[in-house]
Image (cartoon, grey):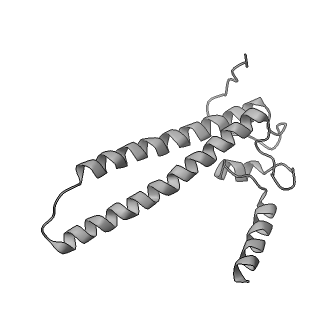
Amino acid sequence: MKQETILPENYIPAESEPFMNARQLEYFRRKLLMWKEELLEGSKETLVDLANSSRNLPDVADRASEETDRSLELRTRDRQRKLVSKIDAALRRIETGDFGYCNVTGEPISLKRLNARPIATMTLEAQERHERRERVHRDD
């Protein structure tokens, strides 16, 4: 059984530590789990709101406005659903020891980038190259 890593209060990973040591991995694991919990809680609230908002509004403009709001909310929740699957993938990478390393180059992803976007799978440079190639192929 894996030993639980204790994190000091207000711990933030530092460049001076060994990269992806037990503390850093635990920090990112907790960060990802809290993010996922927030997203799932928001989804539950949306379902309750949608169930409660099925009113038959007599005014066409009010009805159209409500439908637009509902559509926007559903699109947002769909993006968040996809984000939850990326969070799950990042949690799996923590378990396998691949978290924090670029899928393309194998180099460490900066702690600053991981702190801002813990689901990142590429270094900033690799991501920029990927996006440039994508743009070029899209223009073809």
Task: Examine the rendering and report whether any part of residue 52 can be seen.
Answer: yes
Q: Nearer the viewer, residue 8 or 91?
A: 91
Percent across and percent down for residue 39 are 48, 45
> Is 50 situated left or right of 134 in this image?
left
Q: Position of residue 117 (x, y in %)?
A: 65, 52
Q: Residue furthest front?
A: 140
Q: Compared with residue 49, is residue 63 higher up or lower down, i.e. above or below?
A: below
**Residue located 63% across and 48% down the image:** 86
Task: Check the image and name the residue furthest to the left.
Answer: 58
Quadrant position of the N terminus in the picture? top right
Confirm whether residue 11 shows in the render. no
Q: Please identify the quarter of the rendering in which residue 59 is found.
A: bottom left
Q: Quadrant of the C terminus?
A: bottom right
Q: In the rendered view, does 77 fall on the left or right side of 102? A: left
State the residue in front, 50 or 32.
Answer: 50
Residue drawn at x 61%, y 40% as measured from the top left = 32
Which of the pair 133/123 is nearer the observer?
133
Where is residue 94 shown, x and y percent of the image? 73, 36
Position in image of residue 72 (x %, y %): 39, 64
